[in-house]
Image (cartoon, rainbow, N blue to C red):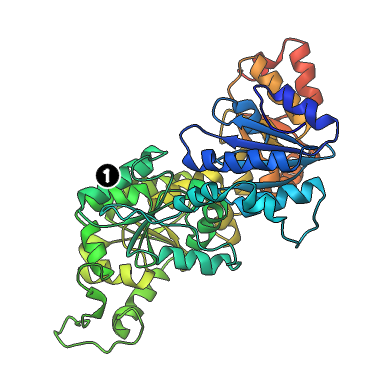
């Protein structure tokens, strides 16, 4: 075989995969320099291993192929053998690429290094140097792109902690300051530039381990994420709100980027210096008061204004979400008490408002609460903490759209034939529907069987009432009754 073949259809890939040969696929993009440099390594490897198929796919031009292999960033490599995907690699790591190719082809075993020719001699020093240059820090005054730490660091949390502290102000974003890859990242960069501060950036599209790991590390599910001195300030909504409210510059100062506020003495209302009892610099009296406030209700919201008269859009958003979830909650107006307003930022290590607590545990601000509601995570936490029951959650889920399908996988990527048939039937009838992937939530998967008295999936609901599974849906469609049943 030898050489790299550009493929332009999913069928081309499937035909090569079917014969059981070793197949390597490089998903690339014309705008990505790392893709171009890694492609040179990939081409040299194709010469080293002439008995394997080396395929190149332009990810954005071939969405059907990219979706089939769950490609979300470039460069991305897929390794196939005996008709099955056996490994993947995301990012510009020439040594790992060579090792993975060698293992798939069978010339080495796990734990052994690849042959020198596969690593550098074949690719040439200029190619490897170009790849290393991609990781060098850009020393421009308003945006440093930080490299990934060495591959030898195996403790992800240690790596993430070092990353978050690698610059006093660090933005984890999609793309770079010069080429943002999403509107929210672009807006965050614009705000930081307008604040006239030096900041570093990390492109989470270039490193999936960091991209996924940081979500858990920070308990923040979306990007961008802004850190100051290793502490999370928040995402896009919070950055915008703090900037517009004049609080972002103060937050930087609070974290010692400007004036090290954390070292100033805490002063009690009587004017006396307080006894500092914790590392945050809060007095024992204030810490005790804040703890008491947080524990004053199972669901506690610190907000600007009150539920009937919110004083900012973000507070209003969280109030609306809690009301939609039909949750009883208590609030505290931080505009009415400056000591609580400033103290809670330090106590919670969260620099903006609103702040939502469930059973004394900080959940986050408006960004996180909204994201958690959309994903169903908020209801899960409310159930786990005993705030609402599983039955209440299931009732809300089946009523979350007029036509609601509980399936295996998603409408774009069903993971069983029955789910796929129901999705196709609904689409062919032009019926809009919501969906829930039961593979992503074992509690819902098992609970819904009892709730509906229906033991299998998919399950289709209309206005909260069960219609049935695959057979019933297909029967309704063949009888011309599906559309009318779902519109009565």
Residue 115 or 215: which is nearer the viewer? 115
Q: Is residue 470 above or below residue 156?
A: above
Helix, strand or loop under label 1? helix
Q: Position of residue 421 (x, y in %)?
A: 75, 24
Q: Position of residue 480 (x, y in %)?
A: 73, 10
Residue 231 or 172: which is nearer the viewer? 172
Number of residues whose C-alpha sits closer than 10 Å to that of mark 1, classed few (under 14), some (14–19) or many (20 or more):
few
- Quarter of the view holding residue 471: top right
Q: Report how many numbered discs are placed on residues in the image.
A: 1
The furthest residue to the left: 271
Q: Is residue 310 visible?
A: no
Q: Is residue 194 above or below residue 288?
A: above
* Left/right of residue 207 with respect to residue 281 in the rendered view: right
* Left/right of residue 31 with respect to residue 428 in the rendered view: left
The furthest residue to the top: 480
Residue 326 or 449: which is nearer the viewer? 449
Q: Could you tell me which residue is drawn at 47 percent across and 46 percent down?
A: 371
Q: Position of residue 155 (x, y in %)?
A: 59, 68
Q: Could you tell me which residue is drawn at 56 percent across and 41 percent down?
A: 75
* Left/right of residue 220 with respect to residue 265 in the rendered view: right
- Quarter of the view holding residue 397: top right
Residue 100 or 107: which is nearer the viewer? 107
Q: Position of residue 157 (x, y in %)?
A: 54, 67
* Left/right of residue 419 with respect to residue 278 in the rendered view: right
Q: Is residue 231 visible?
A: yes
Q: Quadrant of the N terminus?
A: top right
Tag 1 residue? 190
Q: Quadrant of the C terminus?
A: top right
């Amino acid at each position: 075989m030898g050489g790299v073949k550009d493929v332009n259809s999913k069928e081309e890939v499937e035909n090569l995969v079917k014969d059981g040969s070793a197949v390597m696929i490089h998903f690339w993009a014309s705008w990505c320099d790392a893709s171009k440099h890694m492609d040179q390594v990939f081409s040299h490897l194709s010469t080293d291993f002439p008995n394997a198929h080396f395929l190149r796919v332009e990810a954005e031009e071939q969405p059907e192929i990219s979706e089939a292999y769950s490609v979300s960033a470039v460069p991305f490599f897929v390794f196939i053998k005996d008709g099955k995907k056996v490994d993947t690699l995301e990012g510009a790591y020439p040594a790992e690429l060579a090792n993975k190719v060698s293992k798939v082809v069978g010339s080495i075993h796990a734990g052994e290094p690849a042959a020198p020719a596969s690593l550098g001699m074949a690719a040439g020093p200029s190619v490897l140097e170009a790849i290393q240059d991609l990781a060098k820090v850009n020393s421009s005054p308003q945006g440093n792109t930080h490299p990934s730490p060495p591959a030898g660091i195996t403790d992800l949390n240690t790596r993430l902690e070092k990353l978050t502290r690698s610059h006093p102000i660090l933005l984890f974003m999609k793309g770079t300051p010069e080429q943002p890859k999403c509107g929210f990242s672009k807006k965050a960069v614009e705000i930081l530039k307008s604040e006239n501060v030096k900041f570093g950036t990390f492109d989470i599209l270039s490193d999936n381990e960091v991209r996924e790991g940081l979500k858990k590390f920070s308990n923040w599910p979306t990007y961008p994420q802004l850190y100051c001195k290793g502490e999370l300030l928040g995402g896009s909504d919070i950055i915008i709100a703090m900037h517009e409210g004049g609080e972002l510059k103060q937050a930087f100062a609070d974290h010692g980027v400007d004036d090290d506020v954390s070292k100033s003495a805490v002063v009690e209302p009587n004017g006396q210096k307080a006894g500092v009892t914790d590392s945050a610099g809060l007095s024992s009296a204030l810490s005790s008061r804040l703890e008491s406030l947080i524990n004053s209700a199972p669901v506690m919201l610190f907000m600007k204004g009150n539920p009937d008269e919110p004083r900012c859009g973000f507070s209003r958003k969280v109030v609306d979400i809690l009301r939609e979830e039909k949750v009883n909650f208590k609030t505290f107006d931080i505009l009415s008490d400056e000591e609580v307003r400033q103290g809670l930022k330090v106590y919670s290590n969260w620099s903006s408002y609103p702040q939502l607590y469930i059973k004394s545990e900080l959940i986050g601000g408006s960004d996180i609460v909204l994201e958690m509601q959309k994903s169903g995570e908020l209801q899960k936490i409310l159930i786990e903490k005993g705030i609402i029951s599983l039955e209440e959650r299931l009732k809300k889920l089946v009523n979350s759209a007029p036509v609601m399908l509980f399936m295996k996988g998603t409408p774009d990527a069903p993971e069983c034939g029955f789910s796929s048939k129901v999705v196709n039937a609904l689409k062919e009838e032009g019926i809009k529907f919501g969906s829930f992937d039961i593979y992503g939530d074992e509690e819902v998967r098992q609970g819904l069987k009892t709730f509906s008295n229906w033991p299998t999936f998919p399950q289709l609901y209309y206005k909260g009432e069960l219609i049935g599974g695959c057979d019933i849906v297909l029967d309704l469609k063949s009888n011309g009754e599906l559309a009318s049943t779902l519109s009565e």
